[in-house]
Amino acid sequence: MKTKNKQKVFYLSCNCYNFLNIYGNYKRLRQRRKGQFFIFFFQFPAADNFFMGTLRILSGMRPTGKLHLGHYTGALENWIHQQNLLAEDGSRVYETCFLIADYHILTTSLETADAYQHTIDMLLDWLAAGVDPEKSPVFRQSQVKEHAELFLLFAMLITSSRLERNPTLKEQVRDLNMDSLTYGHLGYPVLQAADILLYKGNIVPVGEDQIPHVEITREIARKFNFHYPHPETGSVFPEPEPKITKFSRLVGLDGKAKMSKSLGNTILLSDTPEEVLKKVRNAVTDTLKVRRNDPGRPEVCTVFSYHKRFTAREELDSIEAGCRSGALGCVDCKKLCAAAISAELEPLLEKRRYYEDRIELVREILLEGEIKARALASQTMQEVRTAMKLG
């Protein structure tokens, strides 16, 4: 009996992961907007029966605790849209599941005492934003052993000198002022390759800074296929092709970089209206607008960039005109911005409180998702073991 082929897509960034499982037309997919992620297309026979939808997406983040607006606009909104999108016949377009990539935090920090609490805090924000565990299983990477197993095998296929030539790694060492480098950080692209190839990605739209990682993934796939041909399929893994893609970011309160908790320039999804207002009051605005009546330049103002996302269109034009003419001062503009942000966060805060009061339910959601995830990950590793004649 012939098995029906699937096609999958894997979205990747340093902190976020997305996998799309597609039956059918690649051309139809290309017409969809890809959002904020790098994407990997691949094919292999169907075997997982508890997901019956046309498309599957697995997305994820490193568990660093409570999430901020950058996570919301750059990832979570897209996730929820994909989860809830319906076809004309009322069926779901995507089957979705969500990965907590807790192994990846070890590449830059050995501190794990707060890892579980950070996982719960992040999961609370996911649920508050609209992740529905009935539709979308959630699970920890550390509870799916295949990620670590494939990483171990791939580590045998690449030299340390090759990893040291990775320009992205050199930039990280410089930016983080690191005096020494652990094997885990050096081998981060190998772990990334395991995440990609565990789901057999073969087209990789990426930002330019991630191209070296894709090339390492290609080299590992090529070397594995050469040394361990599969007796039935020949090659176990495809060689992913990079495709350059540009991604937008939500600027931090300091106006100098994207939102990042390490930079202290964020608004958290769990912030109260009072906390949001306090933070927005300190946000950077147009440095040339010194006095209230000075004309402003919205295009260089951090606060106005938030208005463009959170303020209603009919009010946005008025705010822009008031800023340019000098009729609207920065203090009043910030109050309007904070109110717009808080209005969008209000239902998230309410839902977060619901799950905070039912924390055992949150833990059960996690454990149930991990049972499903372990079943999904086993197929590729069985192919790997067959090819390597390891059992």
Image (cartoon, helix red, strand yellow):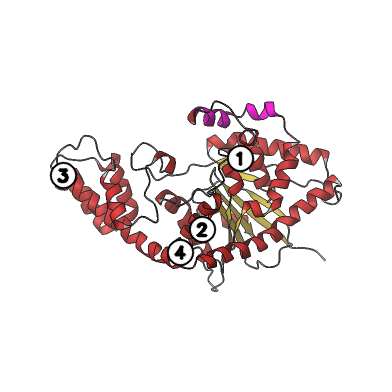
The residues bearing labels 2 and 4 have C-alpha atoms spaced at a distance of 11 Å
Reading the chain from its start, which is encountered first: label 3 or label 1?
Answer: 1
What residue did someone put label 2 on?
Answer: 123
Reading the chain from its start, which is encountered first: label 2 or label 1?
Answer: 2
Above/below status of 269 relative to 197: below
Reading the chain from its start, which is encountered first: label 2 or label 4?
Answer: 2
Badge 4: how crowded within 10 Å, few (<14), some, or many (20+)? some
The residues bearing labels 4 and 1 have C-alpha atoms spaced at a distance of 41 Å
Badge 2: how crowded within 10 Å, few (<14), some, or many (20+)? many
The residues bearing labels 2 and 1 have C-alpha atoms spaced at a distance of 31 Å
> Residue 8 lies in what quarter of the image?
bottom right
The residues bearing labels 2 and 3 have C-alpha atoms spaced at a distance of 44 Å
Tag on residue 105?
none
Give how far across and how far down residue 301 sits, in percent: 28, 41
Left or right of 78, for residue 105: right
Three-letter code, disc 3: Ser
Three-letter code, disc 2: Leu
The residue shown at (75%, 41%) is 153
Badge 1: how crowded within 10 Å, few (<14), some, or many (20+)? many
What residue did someone put label 1 on?
Answer: 242
What residue did someone put label 4 on?
Answer: 356
Per the picture, the main secondary structure of the magenta-coloured stretch is: helix
Region rendered in magenta: 158-174
Reading the chain from its start, which is encountered first: label 3 or label 4?
Answer: 3
* SS at badge 3: helix
